[in-house]
Amino acid sequence: METDLVHDRDLAWSIVCEFIQSDALRRHALAVEASVRSYARAGSEDEEAWGNVALLHDFDWEIHPTLEQHPQAGEAILEERDYPAWFRRAILSHANHLDLARETPLEQTLFACDELSGFVHACGLIRPTGLEGLEPKSVKKKLKTPSFAAGVNRDDVYEGAELLGIDLDDHIRNVVAALQPIAGELGLPT
């Protein structure tokens, strides 16, 4: 039954662990999940389904590390496992190179949280207090340093906040707050 499948967090996590060996990539999945869940709660959306989409958004990156393969080859794996089309499309929509319009709040939120969650996590890793006291001003200053977390697409960070229709400072605050409860799982000071 679709409802059970999209709401089964244990199953989603088992897929992550089946395909991802890197602790860093697993932590990224957890960070994006926490951020997307936070937005789902705030918008009275389906937190479990949204969280599982976020958890699985990069599950295939280690086996499909090129734009020619990721996430489209991973989407085929999820289809084989009976994940519904809307769930798979949300994952596909986070990839700019596929040129899919982000039509639903879920698709917009996943895109908006993906790069920023990774960036906020990186900011927390270099601070003795982790995420505690991390302010938007500090995050935005780091965004202007191209060598810091160089793999994060800054344009996607700015576009994500615009897509959600919120100020970047508020988006940063939301992501920091979403990650704080799982700081330990992210390898950050608690």
Image: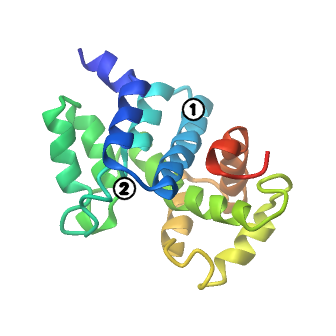
The answer to whether residue 35 is above or below residue 28 is above
Q: Viewer-proximal residue, 45 or 181?
A: 181
User: Can you see residue 144?
Assistant: yes
Q: Which residue has dot 2 on it?
A: 94
The amino acid sitting under disc 2 is: His
Residue at image position (33%, 37%) is 15
Residue at image position (60%, 64%) is 119
Rendered image quadrant of residue 82: top left
Picture coordinates of residue 137, whole percent (x, y): 79, 68
Tell which circle, 1 or 2, labels the residue nearer the N-terminal end: 1
Relative placement, left or right, of 7 versus 72 is right
Q: Quadrant of the N terminus?
A: top left
User: Can you see residue 46?
Assistant: no
Q: Which residue has dot 1 on it?
A: 43
Picture coordinates of residue 81, whole percent (x, y): 18, 31
Check contact, mark 1 vs mark 2: CB within 8 A: no
Between label 1 and label 2, give the one nearer the viewer. Answer: 2
Q: Secondary structure at mark 2?
A: loop
Circle 1: is it few (<14), some (14-19), or many (20+) Cα within 10 Å?
few
Q: Secondary structure at mark 1?
A: loop
Residues at marks 1 and 2, CA–CA distance in whole angstroms: 20 Å
Residue at image position (39%, 46%) is 107
The answer to whether residue 69 is above or below residue 59 is below
Rendered image quadrant of residue 97: bottom left
Picture coordinates of residue 36, whole percent (x, y): 53, 41
Residue at image position (79%, 69%) is 138
Rendered image quadrant of residue 5: top left
